[in-house]
Amino acid sequence: MTNSNGIQKAPRVQDGSSVWESLSRWLPSRDHDSNYWWNVTGPHMAAMLEEAGYSKEKQYENLLIHYHWTVPYMGQAPGADGTVPWKCLITQHGLPLIYSWKWNGASPTSRPDIRIGFEPIGESSGTALDPINQRRTRELLDSFARRIPMDTAWTNHFLSTFYDPETKYWQAKEAGVPLATTTMLGYDYLHDGMTLKTYFFPRLAGQRLLPMDRWDASLRHILSEADSKVGTKALDAVLDFLKASTEGQVLVPTGLAIDNGTSSPTGSQSSRLKFYFRSPHTTFASVREVMTLGGRITGLEAQLQSLHQLLEDVTGLPSDFPDDADAPVHHGFGTGSSPLGRAAYYLYYFDIAPGAEVPDIKFYTPLTHYGQNDLKSAQGVTSWMEANGRGSYCANYLRVLEKVAGEKTLETGNGLQSYLSCLFKQNGELDITSYFLTERS
């Protein structure tokens, strides 16, 4: 049985907003800004947790985490024109929060995981007291360190090696150089606990990107300290690829992410070290070259073909679209507050964790550029899921998007879904994640 959008129906779960309504009835009202963010994002979170099959206990727990440790850190509510004083770098309209739905695998017991990424913002963000907006991030890290097992040694190292003294950024701002996002946090709401992540976007005073030799020195110190014998092997493989491959030579480093700690008994106790890059090339040939690390990683042909099919389904490209042609931009080109919105691009990360011989590699396509509209993008990923025996939560995902879109219909616009990512797992599956925003213009 299918619905009007052509997606197989899943049993409709109870309205997740009932959990949000139950909490809202008893939680104290706060200031105008916090109340705004809770009323906007609370129902979204409730719907995602319910539709992804979380237990009632975890729905309440995760919504309480959202109420206490996200909402008060989201800064000022948007003004009448929809803008906010401090604009987050990675979202199209500068809002501080992005949702993600990590899709279930093929196992009948597999369920989606809900995650968020957000930039903590305070009253002093973007002022002389906190020009690059890191105080609220540090405050939250300290709060979580008292609640879940955490190690902040890596965080402290990267904060001390990736940035100039804060006074230099303020001096540059006074000279006309805009300030921008330098750190973010990520919460992975697993079904049995939570993992906390920190994201770093190094930028020298004057908006200059961090030079590769400074990236290398900072990363090599951490990796060698963690494993003196093979700690840097994955990093060395990436650096060799950046030098030797024509596709590697055009990659621009943009960020780093680490795992700080987890309360999940099944979560990994060792941190990933995710090194992010942007590529101006959007051909599938370039994707193949990066995902295989220039031929250094073999045995991926079946997964590459599956990724090719996924991109066809999501973007609407014909099956005979040339592998050496850049993907056509449908929407979002030259729009949005993010500098990434001003040019065609793909994103990748290389997980260069200590001890790995070669990195795990994740690919991201920005649906704001390459999606047709929000409904067709959703239908594309859900049709691929169903074709690969993973369709149990497809209708649930569509209901979440409709909840977040509110009065705006999915078929009349593009931009709610921001990214679609793919990582090749060792068991042959594709690890797929959909990213979407709190609202669409």
Image: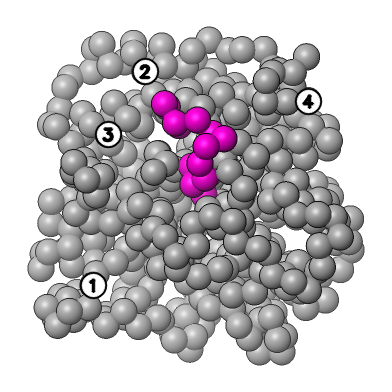
Circle 4/circle 1 CB separation < 8 Å? no
Q: Which of labels 1 and 2 is toward the front?
A: 1
Q: Which of labels 3 and 2 is toward the front?
A: 3
Marker disc for residue 20: 2
Circle 3/circle 4 CB separation < 8 Å? no
Span highlighted in magenta in the image: 404-418
Nearer-N-terminus badge (1/2)? 2
Colour convention of the picture: one colour
Q: Residue 38: horizontal and vertical position, in percent?
A: 28, 29
| Label 3 crowd (10 A; few <14 / some 14-19 / many >=20) | many
* Residue at 25% from the left image edge and 45% from the top image edge: 82
CA–CA distance in space, label 3 to label 4: 35 Å
Q: Horizontal placement of 4 versus 95: left or right?
A: right
| Label 1 crowd (10 A; few <14 / some 14-19 / many >=20) | some
Task: Report the residue marked by disc 1.
Answer: 178
User: SS of the residue at dot 1?
Assistant: loop
User: SS of the residue at dot 3?
Assistant: helix
Q: Which of labels 4 and 2 is toward the front?
A: 2
Circle 4/circle 2 CB separation < 8 Å? no
Task: Report the residue marked by disc 4.
Answer: 108
Nearer-N-terminus badge (4/2)? 2
Task: Report the residue marked by disc 3.
Answer: 37
Q: Horizontal placement of 145 versus 75: left or right?
A: right
